Image (spheres, rainbow, N blue to C red):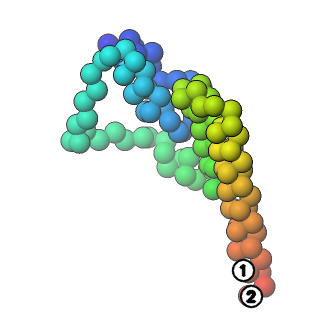
Amino acid sequence: CSFKKAGLFDENTFLYFEEEIFFRKVKNLNMKVVYNPQIYVYHEHSGIVRKEFDLISKKLLLLESEKYFLLNILRCNKTNFLFFIFIRKLEIILFKLMIKFKSFLKRTLK
């Protein structure tokens, strides 16, 4: 099976970048990739993820997958990687502040 030959999905990612990493594995093996828009994939537990994780938790999970992808798959240079991490952490801080501000407004406008 081509899926097994390419090494299956990478166990180092959770929720993000599985397909991209797998595509790169297949490409590196010079295997043919075909897109069929008539095929639909249903993620059985995607609704659970939406309910179980808040926005900040999802952002942190995404960040961990992005770090792995940048360092281990793209082999990004250290300067670009650090700049990317800085931007992502700044984004998370801003989201946290927006959530606190929204909560503050709700309490004060009651």
* Residue 106: mark in rendering: 1
In the image, is 36 to the left or to the right of 61?
left
- Secondary structure at badge 1 equals helix
Question: x, y percentage for residue 41?
Answer: 34, 39
Instruction: Measure the alpha-carbon separation of dots 2 and 1.
Output: 6 Å
Q: Quadrant of the C terminus?
A: bottom right
In the image, is residue 12 above or below residue 44?
above
User: Residue sitting at 62 percent across and 49 percent down?
Assistant: 58
Question: x, y percentage for residue 66?
Answer: 59, 38
Q: Which residue is mark 2?
A: 110
In the image, is residue 7 above or below residue 42?
above
User: Residue sitting at 54 percent across and 39 percent down?
Assistant: 15
- Secondary structure at badge 2 equals loop
Residue closest to the eye, 21 or 81: 81
Q: Quadrant of residue 23?
A: top left
Can residue 68 be seen from the camera position used here?
no
